[in-house]
Structure formats: structure tokens, C-alpha cells
Amino acid sequence: MTDAPPALATQRVTHGFGNGAILEDVSLSVEPGEILAVVGPSGTGKTTLFRLLALFERPDSGTIELAGDDVWSMPDEQHLAVRRKIGMAFQNRSLFSTSVAENVAYGLRVRDSWKIRLRDSISKLVGDENPPTPVSEALETVGMADKAFRDARSLSAGEAQRVAIARALAPNPDILLLDEPTSNLDPRNTAVIEATMRAARERGIAVALATHDMQQAQRVSDRTAVLLNGTCIESGKTEQVFESPADDRVRQFVNGELVY
């Protein structure tokens, strides 16, 4: 029996803009069915890292691997299929000026046979028996099924973020990337989003979470990677990282001390 490769991994990734590197020599991984928290102060490169993980940008050096395959060494025609394995919800939670259900269905539009899947998803939502569809299941997961036909512009910030996560989940990705998903949200919406992460993990989805909330990382993640000044200085089981870190800078950071 051989060990399966991580769902998503970086190997010695470096990336920058202008004259400086934002990320330098970053290596980390997330396994199927686990939650990885990437923690660090604002401005340390978490969003840049997640844009690379989502394949929106190519790193200056190093590799990004999905299920053991180096993505950027693949032929261009394979990149679309690889990207379809990844769902991402951004911190800015941008929604379209249409219904909640249509926002969630957007994720299906860019997949194969999207016209059929989108038509069926929307039509079944209004049926008498309301059978499960990718849209209805995703909305149920984030606790928004009763607001499927609300105008997305009428939602609160927390509800909008839950819809954005449902949109990322609807195509049933292998990997879910969440960039500061509960920033400035109230406790109720935060609790629902954290429950959604756990539900995704139970489905075997690899979840990577960028957060500066230390308590959240401890509540939901199986493993934690600490990013400081663009470098991953420690990663491991969450309990070990927070209770007995190997690096003194990590100890300072998790204890709330300033780290430069």
C-alpha cells in the first residue's frame, strides 16, 4: 500500500512583484478530507499565496502540485480541467446582481454540460418536491436554502459570504480555498461558515483557510502553517503548533506578541 499524494501542495514557491519577493521558499500541503489553516499577520502574503494555489497566477519559482502532478508543467489544454477541481471564496465576497440561487449556479456555468446542469438546478428548486440539486445542496450546507430566491444585493455581509462559499461548493470541487472567510463577520455567521468547513471536510474535500484569527485556526483546522514575512516558518498539527511551537517567532506570534 502506497501513500496517496496531497490534494494540493507547494514546493519551495517564491513569488513577487516589482523588486521584492512577497513569498519566498514556501512549502506546504493539504490532504483530502482535512482543514489546513494558513495563519499570519496582515500583509504577510496569505492572499498572494492563495491566488497561486487557485492557479490565478504562476509562481516565479517552485512548483504547485495537485494530487502529485506539477500543474505548471502540464500542457496548456490541461489547465482548465485542473482549475475545475478547485473552488475559492474571496474575502471581498462579490456577488452578481441577481438571485441567491443564480449566484450559486454560476459555478456550474463554467463546467462541462453547464447549460443542462444549470437549467435542471434552477427548475428543480421551484418544483413541488424540491429534489436535491447541486445548487440546493450547496445552499443547504451554508444555511441559505430558505433565501434561494432573494435578491443577492439585499443580503447582509455574512449572508453574502455564505452564498459565495456555496457558489464555490456547488461544482463539488476536490479543493476549497477560503481567504479570510469570516473577516468582520458576526459570531452567528462565523459559526455557520466554520460548520461549512467541517461539512466539506466530511465530504473528503481538502480545505485550506487563510486567517489571522488564532482562535478560529484552533477551532477548525487539523493542521496549521504559520506564514511570517512571506515565508512558512513552521507547519504541523494545530495542537502542536499552538501549544509547543518549534520556532520562537511562532511562539511570539501565537501569544499575541509583535513579530517583524
Image: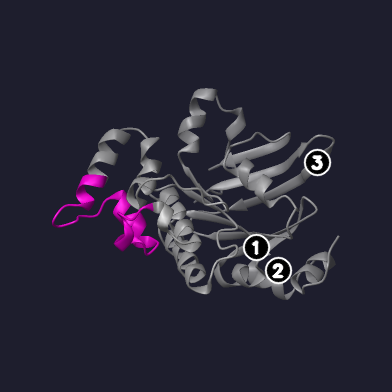
Q: Position of residue 18 (x, y in %)?
A: 81, 34
Question: Is 125 left, or right, of 60 in this rendering?
Answer: left
Q: Position of residue 167 (x, y in %)?
A: 42, 49
Residue type indicated by callout 3: Ala
Mark number for residue 98?
none
Report which quarter residue 131 is drawn in. bottom left
Earlier residue among tags 1 and 2: 1
**Residue indicated by mark 1:** 224
Verify CB contact (< 8 Å) between mark 1 and mark 2: yes
Q: Which residues are magenta?
A: 122-151
Crowding at mark 3 (Cα within 10 Å: few <14, some 14-19, many 20+): some
Picture quarter with the C terminus: bottom right
Q: Amino acid at mark 1?
A: Thr
Residue 241 badge: 2
Mark closest to the chain's N terminus, 1 or 3: 3
Q: Position of residue 90 (x, y in %)?
A: 55, 50
**Mark 3, secondary structure of its residue:** strand
What is the distance, in whole Å, between disc 1 and disc 2 at their CAs? 7 Å
Q: Secondary structure at mark 2?
A: helix
Above or below, 47 relative to 112? below
Whether residues under marks 2 and 3 lie with C-beta atoms below 8 angstroms apart, the answer is no
Give the residue at mark 3.
21
Q: Is residue 250 above or below residue 180?
A: below
Residue 53, position in %: x, y? 60, 44
Task: Using a 10 Å C-alpha cutoff, classify the residue at mark 2 as few (fewer than 14 neighbours), some (14 to 19) or many (20 or more).
Answer: many
Residue at 36% x, 40% y is 108
Q: Amino acid at mark 2?
A: Val
Q: Residue at x 77, y 36 (%)?
A: 17
